[in-house]
Amino acid sequence: MDELLDSLLKRINDGTYPPGSQLPSGQTLADEFNVSQSTISRAAAKLRKQGLLIGRPGRGVFVAEDRPR
């Protein structure tokens, strides 16, 4: 999961997923990284705890606009 977290962090930091943007669906990410959706969910939960992502029920997961430095 560390490689997955590193990849997501890199995409957030390099602007691939800019502030306010929606991440691809869990299934899309699971397919891309060849992991289970539960692994994607755990990675997203870690990034939410760090203040980098925001979950919006019924809408998806978004990159936080006011991110910690």
Image (cartoon, rainbow, N blue to C red):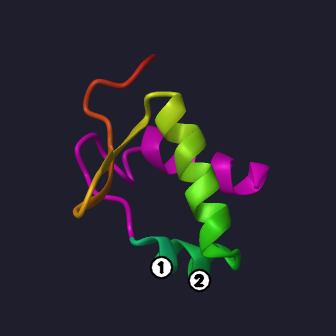
The x, y position of residue 63, in whole percent, is 34, 44
Frontmost residue, 66 versus 45: 45
Quick one: SS at disc 2? helix
In contact (CB < 8 Å): disc 1 and disc 2: yes
The x, y position of residue 35, in whole percent, is 70, 74
Q: Does 53 appear in magenta?
A: no
Q: Which residues are magenta?
A: 1-24
**Mark 1 residue type:** Thr
Q: Residue at x 47, y 79 (%)?
A: 28
Q: Residue at x 60, y 73 (%)?
A: 37
Q: CA distance from mark 1 to mark 2?
A: 5 Å
Q: Which residue has dot 2 on it?
A: 31
Mark 2 closeness class: few <14, some 14–19, many ≥20 residues within 10 Å = few
Q: Residue at x 59, y 40 (%)?
A: 46
Query: Is residue 65 in view from this perspective?
Result: yes
Q: Quadrant of the C terminus?
A: top left
